[in-house]
Amino acid sequence: MLKVSYLLIIVCMAAATFIEKSRGTGFVAHNVYGAWWFTALWAVLTAATAVHFIRRRIRRPAIVSLHASFAVILGGALLTHLTSARGVMQLREGETTSLYLTPDGGGTSQRSLPFGVRLDKFDIEYHEGGTAPADYRSEISLVRGGETVGKATVSMNNICTYGGIRLYQSDYDRDLRGSTLAVNADPWGIPVTYLGYAMLFVSLVWMLADPKGTFRRLLRSPLLKNGLVCAAVLAAVGAASPCRAATVLPRETAAEMGRLNILYNGRVCPLQTFAIDFTKKLCGRSSYAGYTAEQVLTGFMFWGDEWSREPIIRMKGGALRERLQLPAYCSVSTFFNADMGGYILGPYVREYLDGNGDRFHRDVADIDDRLMLVMEVRRGPLLKLFPRMTSGHAVWYAATALSDSTPARLLSQLGRYAAEGNQAETARAIGEIREYQTANGGTSVPSPLRAGAERMYNTIPFATILFMVNLAMGAVTLLLEIRNMTSRRQQPTSGSRRRLTPGQWFPLSVMLLSLAALTFCEALRWIIGGTVPLSNGYETMLFTAWTVMLLSVVAARRFRIALVFGFFMSGLFLLVSHISLMDPNITHVMPVLNSPLLSLHVSVIMISFALLAMTFGCGVTAIAVAMAGGKGAAGRDTRLESLQLLSRIFLYPALATLAAGIFIGAIWANVSWGQYWGWDPKEVWALITLMVYAIAVHTGSVPALRRPLAYHIFMTAAFLTVLMTYFGVNYILGGMHSYA
């Protein structure tokens, strides 16, 4: 019954995430997660676990406390399900109401609070220089018996609690005269659930520190002392067309232009950042034919007709190239032909907008987007270079959007001096624009430290360099270890301390340098963005690579194989960040995401994924060893056992950090919007990942996993849940967490 209920819950949760994709969140909330049979499955699992503990007479305090914490958490969830009340309250300035709407079956019903709420004022705090909201604030009065009994400010991650009822900032009216507050009343479920969380954290630390526990016993294994773990792995083992001499600004002058500030992606940043993204979108690289990104951008700004004839647009889509007989690189003017009716992609764009989404039309849409980008640069609406103070807040505009003639005059004279080739006057015009920005931008102008950090970050392609270095070093490290293994040197005897040879110091030194470089990269992104760089998929992938490298350095002294895994796994993570659909741009985070708990939640989860990636490396290596054979069955089994030992050493802290990360996220969600578990697809798949990997530590219930090869096959397959959690939810299922 225990195994059946456990597997049924995993299958039901996985199926529900795909059903939600087609039938909607409300359907699965009502028919799966909120259904009586789903609650009954959890109850059966809890009861079966208790019976199992009694029958097996399991009395180790750490294990009992750990499993009891999950029972308490489930009890708290049940209390929340049965006794809590949730809804939304619509407020208008100056009006008092106690009514709120709550979900009721397929619709909503109206309920009343025991007190009234009056909205005194609603306000939005914007990020410097733009119109992207940094926070929403509702200043409210609490009214009871016609008397004001208290005042509070409700904002993102700042709630108001009164009479056991919590109010959260949820939404606002577009006229800025009204606000929507989320209402949450859960007096019983939250304290019980938090008690379960506290028990869980204590139990996880206890499990890892318990001298009689499995994890500490693994660390005392004789295999770690004689170097067999290290020995186990050793046996396992179109360029663009030439530029047509287009007119450009001198490199130094263009660089000065790049030091100007612009509002881009909702934040004020150096023009260099926009120029690099602009050039990458056109030709796939940050430079073109020896010209810097700043020279390319200013080329289109000041010599648009000439640069429109440059073959700079990379044709990525084979379907479009084949049908229209286009070269690998085209110019902007290629797509404008008077004899063919003007814009030759126009009819295909209309077909795409009408719903034709085949490969050819998707390629057309991609090229159309890039052509429109060029047009917007030439016309000027994208060049938001000029700030204006409004009500004490600086907002940046393009010259074309301002009635003030000064910005247009400054930009016009800059273009005239550039066209004349008068470098002295061009530099002076750039200086005048910089002075205008400083005089009118207030605090929205980036500090010298932040601007310098961003220019340095733009100059060095950290992810590109490091993924190539780490993957190459993975191969080099493996060859070095094979050489050491096949040399005539004797293996160290049991209990001896091994000195690192020059051949071992070299890869360790490279790993330390790579780790330092990635740390520097992360620090630059932190300075530029102003928040911990963990707000999107690209940043979390970098952090995962950083964690893998740190783990390999820590483990390298005892496990030489750790460096091999570290180079290969970190290189792969960096490669994925480099070539995937992840957006490397630094942007302002959503107001609800601006919380220290979120940074802690993501950090702990990524550490767990890094550790699980190491178990995957052990699994793949072990399967390769088993398939290769050699040195007899006894030698092969020893290597498999050694790899299993190493994998399990990674597995226990991976499970601890994954469990801790999930429930830290639950606490953050409860603080942010009053719902610590919402059955979002990423939440569900994180729980599935935890439950799948937890099977590997229950060898008493699953004796097959005591066999090394079966264990490694399971761990290799289990990594699919990690991939689904991290990538699959983002790109297939969606949900609230798809921003990651």
Image (cartoon, helix red, strand yellow):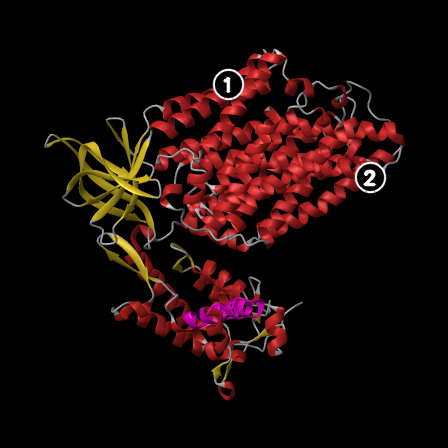
* Residue 508 shows up from this direction: no
Q: Is residue 412 left or right of residue 163?
A: right
Q: Which residue is mark 1?
A: 68
Residue at 70% in and 28% down = 646
| Viewer-nearest residue: 347 or 272 | 347
Residue at 36% in and 63% down = 384
| Viewer-nearest residue: 693 or 610 | 693
Is residue 665 within the magenta segment? no
Give, as a single range, the part of the protein colored magenta. 354-377
Please say if 711 is above or below 363. above
**Quadrant position of residue 325:** bottom right
Residue 152, x across and y down, in percent: 22, 34
Q: Is residue 474 left or right of residue 135?
A: right
Give the label on residue 476, or none: none
Residue 180, x across and y down, in percent: 26, 44
Q: Overall secondary structure of the magenta stretch?
A: helix
Q: Amino acid at mark 2?
A: Met
Q: Amino acid at mark 1?
A: Ala
Give neighbour class at mark 1: few <14, some 14-19, many 20+ (Cα, 10 Å).
some
Judge depth for marks 2 and 1 and give the one in front. 1
Please say if 291 is above or below 451. below
Residue at 72% in and 47% down = 472
Label tally: 2
- Element class at badge 1: helix
Q: Is residue 119 left or right of residue 14?
A: left
Give the label on residue 627, or none: 2
Residue 580, x across and y down, in percent: 58, 53
Please say if 296 is above or below 5. below
